[in-house]
């Protein structure tokens, strides 16, 4: 968005409107695309406004930008809850494949819609994209629940969600380079479409929903996974026996939901508006903006992997229980994130952009631990209902995502340092509140109500297995008897 919008034209239009209203007219100062960390005279005299322009072509107001940001969230809210019924009945890998393909087509179409039909057409397209996005997270979580034992889920989630950090760490510099090139901002959408198409082809030929369906696997690995992961349950039986009342009244699940809401709101704000913060407050050029946006994600990625492996090792050594592990992880994410947000609010401005980068690296590093916290909790409470619980949790997190543009629009009118300071303080307090609730009520253990349902399922499977084995044994005995009879007849003939 920072590359798409013509900041100079927008600022001139806003200032012209302000001048018509007898307000003081501020001058517009252009900062070169590669100039970094210049405060400009606005900080000295308060009379001149600094505008950093990345060469965009669209004149969209802050309201229109926020509306576009919210589009995918509105679409996801519509399909988040219904998705659990389809996911329970159809192949997880195919549902995910279709959702990504749908998302890709609309991504590639975005530049055409933006330049020919305006911001509202892009908003509608992003709502349509959100309809497909509502299937992605529940499908991902259900696949993880099927493929990984409980003792390995923190590591699995850390690796499985690496795409977020790889996209941000590797994608931000690429996007910045494309924006600064002759190809323009439109090329970023086409580039994303090409990557998604390559992924879809690989996924189609390699992915399966359950270890029992995998064709390329060693016998030892298959036996281990089938023994230690959730048994594959008939889709019709599973969807008809979901204990919705028990799920929605579980204190551990409610603690997970509120944490999902808070973390999503905070991380969505940084995902959408961090480049704007670099542009408006730190006055970074486009290349520096891309670099500053990518580096914190590298720290997040490393911390997430190292922390996830370490937590699983501590659980394996019986040093930490499943519940203690998720609470320690979430506490590090919530309280560590709050501390760094206070540092951003009180100790960072355009005169020290390097300090801002260091603090943001620390904040993103602490956020790498929440995957082993509330996220692992979600997949541990009732593994056989992961898709259903993920859909409910995602619905609540999407409410947080929907609120993000509204919160940003309410508190960020001009993009000033004081506005961003207030945003950081509120987010820090939200971190502390959500982390405290999870530490008191969260859990990483299989719930009692889920154990009962799971045992019933296992008993049915064992009965079916015994019946099939007895039938096979009778067939074998019959075949042997008939074979002996034939041998006896032949010997008599001889």
Image (spheres, rainbow, N blue to C red):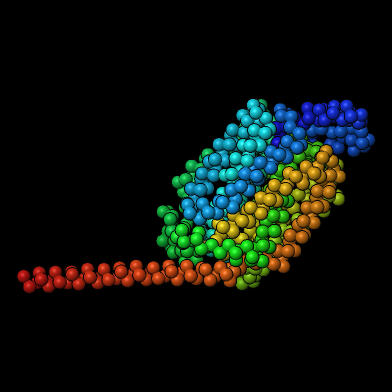
**Where's residue 402, x and y in %?**
70, 47
**What is the quadrant of the N terminus in the image?**
top right
Relative horizontal placement of residue 384, taking residue 318 as reference (left or right): left
Relative horizontal placement of residue 126, taking residue 208 as reference (left or right): right
Relative horizontal placement of residue 357, taking residue 91 as reference (left or right): right
Would you place residue 178 above or below residue 221 in this image? Answer: above
Would you place residue 416 above or below residue 148 in this image? Answer: above
**Where's residue 304, x and y in %?**
65, 56
Quadrant of residue 327 in the image? bottom right
Quadrant of residue 173 in the image? top right
Q: Is residue 299 visible?
A: no
Q: Is residue 5 visible?
A: yes
Q: How many marks?
A: 0
**Where's residue 359, x and y in %?**
78, 50
Q: Residue at x 77, y 46 (%)?
A: 407
Which is more toward the observer, 378 or 488? 378
Which is more toward the observer, 356 or 329? 329
Which is more toward the observer, 473 or 344? 473
Q: Residue at x 60, y 66 (%)?
A: 246
Quadrant of residue 52 in the image? top right
**What is the quadrant of the C terminus in the image?**
bottom left
- Farthest right residue in view: 45
Q: Residue at x 78, y 52 (%)?
A: 427
Which is more toward the observer, 457 or 11? 457
Q: Residue at x 53, y 48 (%)?
A: 96
**Where's residue 361, x and y in %?**
74, 50
């Amino acid at each position: 968005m920072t590359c798409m919008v013509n900041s100079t034209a927008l600022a001139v239009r806003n200032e012209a409107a302000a001048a018509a209203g007898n307000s003081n007219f501020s001058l517009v100062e252009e900062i070169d695309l590669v100039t970094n960390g210049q405060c400009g005279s606005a900080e000295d005299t308060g009379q001149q406004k600094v505008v950093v322009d990345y060469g965009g072509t669209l004149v969209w107001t802050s309201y229109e930008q926020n509306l576009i940001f919210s589009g995918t969230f509105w679409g996801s809210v519509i399909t988040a809850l219904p998705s659990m019924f389809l996911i329970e009945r159809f192949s997880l890998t195919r549902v995910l494949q279709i959702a990504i393909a749908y998302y890709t087509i609309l991504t590639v179409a975005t530049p055409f819609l933006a330049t020919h039909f305006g911001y509202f057409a892009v908003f509608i397209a992003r709502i349509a994209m959100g309809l497909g996005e509502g299937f992605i997270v529940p499908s991902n979580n259900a696949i993880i629940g099927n493929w990984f034992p409980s003792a390995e889920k923190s590591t699995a989630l850390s690796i499985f969600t690496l795409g977020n950090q790889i996209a941000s760490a590797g994608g931000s510099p690429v996007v910045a380079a494309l924006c600064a090139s002759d190809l323009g901002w439109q090329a970023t959408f086409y580039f994303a479409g090409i990557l998604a198409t390559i992924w879809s082809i690989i996924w189609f030929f390699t992915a399966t929903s359950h270890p029992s369906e995998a064709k390329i696997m060693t016998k030892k690995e298959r036996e281990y996974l089938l023994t230690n992961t959730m048994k594959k349950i008939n889709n019709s039986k599973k969807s008809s026996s979901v204990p919705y009342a028990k799920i929605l009244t579980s204190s551990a699940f409610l603690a997970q939901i509120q944490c999902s809401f808070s973390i999503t709101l905070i991380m969505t704000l940084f995902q959408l508006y961090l480049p704007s913060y670099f542009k408006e407050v730190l006055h970074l050029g486009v290349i520096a903006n891309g670099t500053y946006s990518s580096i914190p994600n590298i720290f997040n990625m490393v911390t997430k992997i190292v922390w996830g492996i370490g937590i699983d090792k501590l659980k394996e050594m019986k040093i930490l229980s499943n519940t203690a592990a998720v609470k320690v992880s979430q506490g590090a994410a919530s309280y560590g994130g709050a501390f760094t947000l206070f540092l951003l609010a009180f100790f960072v401005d355009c005169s020290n952009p390097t300090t801002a980068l260091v603090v943001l690296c620390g904040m993103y590093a602490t956020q790498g631990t929440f995957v082993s916290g509330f996220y692992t909790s979600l997949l541990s409470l009732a593994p056989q209902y992961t898709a259903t619980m993920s859909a409910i949790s995602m619905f609540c997190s999407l409410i947080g995502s929907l609120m993000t543009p509204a919160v940003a629009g309410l508190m960020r009118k001009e993009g000033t340092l004081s506005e961003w300071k207030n945003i950081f303080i509120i987010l820090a307090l939200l971190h502390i509140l959500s982390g405290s609730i999870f530490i008191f009520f969260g859990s990483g253990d299989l719930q009692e109500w889920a154990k009962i349902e799971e045992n019933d399922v296992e008993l049915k499977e064992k009965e079916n297995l015994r019946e099939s084995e007895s039938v096979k044994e009778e067939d074998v005995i019959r075949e042997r008897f008939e074979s002996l009879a034939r041998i006896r007849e032949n010997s008599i003939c001889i």
